[in-house]
Image (spheres, rainbow, N blue to C red):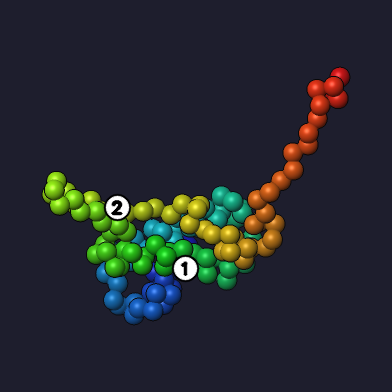
Amino acid sequence: MALATWQDVAVALGRPSDSLTPEQQHQITYWLNGVELHLKARLGPIADLDPDAVKYVETEIAAAKARPLLAGGGATSITVSVDDGNVTRRYDPVTPADITDDLWSLFGPAVNATSYTIAIRSPQDIS
C-alpha cells in the first residue's frame, strides 16, 4: 500500500478532497500503488527509503496523472472522430517513464546514475 493517499494528491492539485468522486479516489489510489511498485522494483524495500521522499514522489506522479483525468471527465485522453462517429477514452497506467530524473534524484545520486562503462578488449587479448 502506498505511503501517499488520494487526499495528498487532492492537496497537491489544490482541490478539496470532497471534490473527488469515489471513482477518482480509486483511480488515484491505483496510480499511487503503481508508483510504489516501480519504486520497489528499482530501489528495493520501501521501508529502507526516506518516507518523505517516497510520499512526495508518489503524490507528484499521481497528481500528474490526475490532472488530465479530472479535466477530461474521467479519462486521461479522449479522441473523437467526427466522420466515423467514434469516441475513444484512454486510461493510462503508471510507467517507469513517469518517474522523472529529478524525482529519482530525491533518493540519492546513485539512483539517478544511468551511465556505465564497458571494458573494451581486443580478440588478441583473450588467450
The Cα–Cα distance between marks 1 and 2, rounded to whole angstroms, is: 21 Å
Q: Residue at x 81, y 26 (%)?
A: 122
Residue 89, image x and y in percent? Answer: 25, 53
How many numbered callouts? 2
Residue 114, image x and y in percent? Answer: 65, 50
Q: Is residue 87 above or below residue 15?
A: above
Q: Which residue is mark 2?
A: 90
Q: Is residue 69 above or below residue 41?
A: below
Say which of 94 and 114 sits in front: 114
Q: Earlier in the sequence, mark 1 or mark 2?
A: 1
Q: Amino acid at mark 2?
A: Arg
Q: Residue at x 74, y 43 (%)?
A: 117
Q: Where's the C terminus, which quadrant?
A: top right
Query: What number is the disc on residue 59?
Result: 1
Q: Amino acid at mark 1?
A: Thr
Query: What number is the disc on residue 21?
Result: none
Q: Residue at x 26, y 69 (%)?
A: 21
Task: Specify whether residue 24 is in view.
Answer: no
Q: Which of the 4 image quarters holds residue 113? A: bottom right
How many residues crowd mark 2 within 10 Å: few (<14), some (14–19), many (20+)? Answer: few
Which circle, 1 or 2, is nearer the viewer?
2
Task: Specify whether residue 54 is in view.
Answer: yes
- 110 on left or right of 38: right
Q: Which of the 4 image quarters holds residue 39? A: bottom right
Identify the residue at the far front of this view. 83
Identify the residue at the far top of this view. 127
Q: Is residue 34 above or below residue 4?
A: above
How many residues crowd mark 1 within 10 Å: few (<14), some (14–19), many (20+)? Answer: many
Element type at mark 1: helix
- 82 on left or right of 38: left
Q: Which of the 4 image quarters holds residue 100? A: bottom right
